[in-house]
Amino acid sequence: MEKQKADKLIVKYSSKIYGFAVKKAFSYDEAEELSGEMLKEVYLSMLSAGDIVNVEGYIWRICEHVYAKYVNQIKMKGGVSLDGMDGYEPSFYDEYDLGEAEEEIKKLRKEIGFLSSSRREIVYSFYYEGKSIAQIAKEKALPAGTVKWHLNKARNDLKEGFTMERKIGSLGLSPVKALGFSHNGRPGKNGGPEYYLSDKINLNIVYSVYEEPKTVAEIAEDLGMTPVYLEDKINLLAANGFLVETKGNRYTTYVKFSPKQWSLEAEHNNVLMQYKVAKILAEKYVPKVRAAVEKLKDTDVYIPGGNRELLEAAAIFYAIDSKCALPVEKDLSKHRIKTLDGADYFVSVETETKILDPDFKSDDEISKYKSQDFWCCGEMTRDSEKYPCLYSWSCDTRFDSRKGAWENNLNSDYESLYEIITGAITESKATAEKFKRLRDRGYLSKDGKVNIMIVKKSWDEFANLIPKPDESLLKEFANYALEQAMVMARQYPPQIQDRVIVDVMHFAIGSTVAMMVLDILYESKVFRPLTTAEKIAANLLMFSDRLPE
């Protein structure tokens, strides 16, 4: 008989043969051993046989032969079969007979897919490959009793799964979609978190454990897929920190997703609080920062166009974003996701949110703002192993005209500028690509002049030059922020709430407030409006031991 035909017949009759063994054995363990021996003998006989006229009769004759040997070897020791009956009639097959129903066979195979990987492998070895308990135990380096236990548990799980109605979870019917990814920290060699989460299945695996921890089987059911397909993806996400194992072989995640529901009024109240803080900082803190920047002599700085307000604005943004952190004592180390490619960051995913109060309107002093007005790529720093004296600080916002955000902010840009400043390179065919890159970014003008601000000091010297605000101001701001933080945190699952509180407390006086302060300074004409050329250099500082001539 052809192997392909024999394989199909073994699959068709495996459940019937197991039913026969269950009725004749003394225990479930012996039934497993007996059915395995029967499957083995039947399969080998069919492979060596020619055409078989009566397949069913042929199979049962072999099973009776195996059973007769079993009686001679084992049953003489005494005992009672599982059902207390000595005889066997074909009618007993009906309890286990899948018949010709292809759908039921598919369902059984699917249920095998829901077994754990180790149990699934044992089931396949025993029922599909016809290996004995002893052989499987040797291959898996397990006691024979453990293999029998796995087979017994697998059979019970399959019975339960076969009779239950598996329902596709919500993510299987309506998978979550990412509208955007962001991170706070150091990206890896493969870039940001989108390298892992732009895969829709990976994203939905992580989202499935966001509200409550789940096992592999529960994740699979939520996505309407089998664990067989998902296990490699789950292992990849766990190895790279996007999934974290908890009690009971369950997984959770510290990736922060947008809340399912959002209140415009709550968001408005938070921004209103920030604007209140911004006005206080513009009045009481900005003058101190400007006074500190005045200590930098003209020989210490290079400013395209000579507008020192551009330098002051960058220093003010840095000061508010970095020096005004509110006191909050919460350890967020477990929220940091560390990947195998070297990333170490907090991860956020923007998803669709239902607005609870779409008709909310306000007519106060911040109603003129839109949420995108406060977009900020985040504080970016770059250094150089090639030139240790080099460092850069920047924030991309609506105040500048730079494109590409953090991915387009390359260390090599500053190295190329330094080489131009020091005369290490000049424009030629060999350096044409570097010069074109800098001109495309706007960092170099058409006539070869450097078009970003450069400070002839180290980054640490500059940072130490900028004062902190008074402690009394920070305490006042902390009281404003904590109330808003608690309100915002309730919109997130428990494992994310600490991070939300810290984020709100930190960003209560962060880039959003920094942008508000600059708005106040430009609108009140303390600073004159930025020109097109100045927008390239806005909120960007390079630190070097040399300045352009």
Image (cartoon, grey):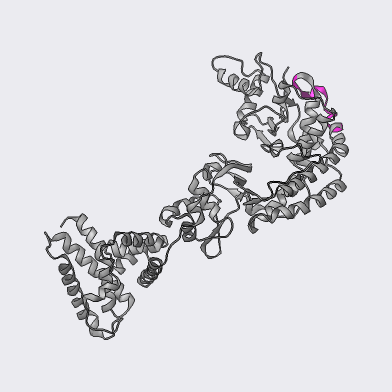
Residue displayed at 32% across by 62% down = 104
- Asked which quadrant contains residue 330, the reply is bottom right
Residue displayed at 86% across by 46% down = 473
- The front one of 406 and 108 is 108
State whether residue 35 appears in this view. Answer: yes
Q: Position of residue 477 (x, y in %)?
A: 82, 48
> Looking at the image, how many numbered discs can be counted on the residues?
0
User: Which region of the structure is painted magenta?
Assistant: 291-304
Residue displayed at 49% across by 50% down = 236
> Eyeballing the image, is 486 above or below 177?
below
Magenta segment includes 300? yes
Q: Position of residue 479 (x, y in %)?
A: 82, 52
Residue at the limit of the structure toward the bottom, as seen here:
78
**In the visual, does 175 lie left or right of 388?**
left
Q: In the rendered view of the protein, which quadrant contains the N terminus?
A: bottom left
Residue at the limit of the structure toward the front, as seen here:
359
**In the visual, does 404 lie left or right of 148?**
right
Q: In the rendered view of the protein, which quadrant contains the C terminus?
A: top right
> Eyeballing the image, is 457 above or below 192?
above
- The front one of 533 and 259 is 259
**In the visual, does 53 lie left or right of 286?**
left
Q: Position of residue 70 (x, y in %)?
A: 22, 77
